């Protein structure tokens, strides 16, 4: 890698010549160098002083900077197909930054493909954070990505704006200029991103990966059966906690071609989203895997519950429902028969649009641990109504396996693996030897 490197700072400088060549990693530093010059220069100084290299991208609009940058604001605008003059003439700051965001995304992906940087870090207030979130979303999982923001961890940032593996750091004391608190936050961020660049192994190629959505063993227990079963067949199981970011990570990996198949067996975060909970993974959940055509086995695990923050009062419409308080962060409330039918219809809409191999498995005796007899979710008529609605709404071409078992019974995992075994046999999924045949080989790339 031959990155563009600007002059190193001195206050934090160590002996760069002593740093092994294979550890000299490059960090893409993004920010508005007109208004945040001092802070970005300090960030560069710490990174370079610890033996890293900096590739600086200026996303300013109105002002200019004398801080050396490898990628100017003119380069960023050009990547968006406009000039800075046209960005300024856009008429408002939101439109202007949207254009700079587009250019920054294009350039970041181009530079990554050229192996010009190993990690990304950005710094800003709401404007800079807005742009940084877009860039982080564009970069694949496995590339370290850090955002230093005055609104880190804020409710202003919805789940669908967050890259699945993004790291956010609160820019404490950093609203205007450097100070002791700001230096402390920036120096930690610089160390974090450079350390990640040096140690990250990325999503390496090895055994074919199967993504599996789930919750913990308190609710769903099929992980105990599926992990060894997949390993015995030469596959590696990656389990994703389906409470917001987990599903986003799984679907992002599917879109990036990192997964051989998906077992989407827990739809909790999807269900949360359609019933108005903040504990969700965005409006595209349950659609993205099907749109890229990746083989998927789907079951409605925990689709009869909605997760809500324990630390907030229950919404009025849920106040009289049975509620399981899991911990001080999250609680689960049950759904009525009508709400479960609504869930079933929404699931069917997404699955019917899938472009690749799909199989639905329905465990007729229950879909999570708390719907057993004596538990808060036990409601056999409502569960039967859910299954009835789902089967009625699914396209007749979608194969469905209904089993007389609970989702936490071994029989459920066996039914899932029976479908997967057929897909291995007929070449629908990539084999452990890395071969892709049949439907898997013809999977769309869009």
Image (cartoon, grey):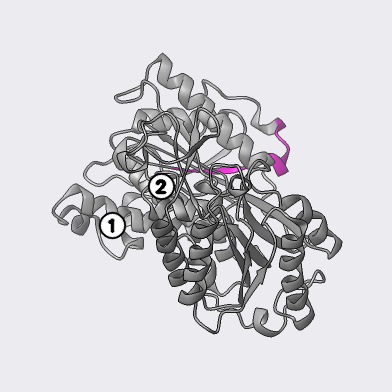
Q: Nearer the viewer, mark 1 or mark 2?
A: 2
Residue at numbered disc 1: 99
**Pointer 1 or 2: first along the chain:** 1
Q: Residue at x 32, y 43 (%)?
A: 317
Which residues are drawn in magenta? 18-29
Query: Does residue 169 lie above or below 347 as drawn?
Result: above
Image spot of residue 343 (x, y percent): 44, 61
Q: Residue at x 66, y 27 (%)?
A: 15
Residue at numbered disc 2: 133
Residue 49 visible (yes or no) = yes
Q: Residue 441's quadrant in the figure? A: bottom right
Residue 182 badge = none
Q: Nearer the viewer, residue 233 or 90?
A: 233
Label 1 SS = helix
Image spot of residue 45 (x, y percent): 50, 29
Question: Does the magenta run of residues contain 83?
Answer: no
Query: Does residue 261 lie above or below 435 as drawn?
Result: above
């Amino acid at each position: 890698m031959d990155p563009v490197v600007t002059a190193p700072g001195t206050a934090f400088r160590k002996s760069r010549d002593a740093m092994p060549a294979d550890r000299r990693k490059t960090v893409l530093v993004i920010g508005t160098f007109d208004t945040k010059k001092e802070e970005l220069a300090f960030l560069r100084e710490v990174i370079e002083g610890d033996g890293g290299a900096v590739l600086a991208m200026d996303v300013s609009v109105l002002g200019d900077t004398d801080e050396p940058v490898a990628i100017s604001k003119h380069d960023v605008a050009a990547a968006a197909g406009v000039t800075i003059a046209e960005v300024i003439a856009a008429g408002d700051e939101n439109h202007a930054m949207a254009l700079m965001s587009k250019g920054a995304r294009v350039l970041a992906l181009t530079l990554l493909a050229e192996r010009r940087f190993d990690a990304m870090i950005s710094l800003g207030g709401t404007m800079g954070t807005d742009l940084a979130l877009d860039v982080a979303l564009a970069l694949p999982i496995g590339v370290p990505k850090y955002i230093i923001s005055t609104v880190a961890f804020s409710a202003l940032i919805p789940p669908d704006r967050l890259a699945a593996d993004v790291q956010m750091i609160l820019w404490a004391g950093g609203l205007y200029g450097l100070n002791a608190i700001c230096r402390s936050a920036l120096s930690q961020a610089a160390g974090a991103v450079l350390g990640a660049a040096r140690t990250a192994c990325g999503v390496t190629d090895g055994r074919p990966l199967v993504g599996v959505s789930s919750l913990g063993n308190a609710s769903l227990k099929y992980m105990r059966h599926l992990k060894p079963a997949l390993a015995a067949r030469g596959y590696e199981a990656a389990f994703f906690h389906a409470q917001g970011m987990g599903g986003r990570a799984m679907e992002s990996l599917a879109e990036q071609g990192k997964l051989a198949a998906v077992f989407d067996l827990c739809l909790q975060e999807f269900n949360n989203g359609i019933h108005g909970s903040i504990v969700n993974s965005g409006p595209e959940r349950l659609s993205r895997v099907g749109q890229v055509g990746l083989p998927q086995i789907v079951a409605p695990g925990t689709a009869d519950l909605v997760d809500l923050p324990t630390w907030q009062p229950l919404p009025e419409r849920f106040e009289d429902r049975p509620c399981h308080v899991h911990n001080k962060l999250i609680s689960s409330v049950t759904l009525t028969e009508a709400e479960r039918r609504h869930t079933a219809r929404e699931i069917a809409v997404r699955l019917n649009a899938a472009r690749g191999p799909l199989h639905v498995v329905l465990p007729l005796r229950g879909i999570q641990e708390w719907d057993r007899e004596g538990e808060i979710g036990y409601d056999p008529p409502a569960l039967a109504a859910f299954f009835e609605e789902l089967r009625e709404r699914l396209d007749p071409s979608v194969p469905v396996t209904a089993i007389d078992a609970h989702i936490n019974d071994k029989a459920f995992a066996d039914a899932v693996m029976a479908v997967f075994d057929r897909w291995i046999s007929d070449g629908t999924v990539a084999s452990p030897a890395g071969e892709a045949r049949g439907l898997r080989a013809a999977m769309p790339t869009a």
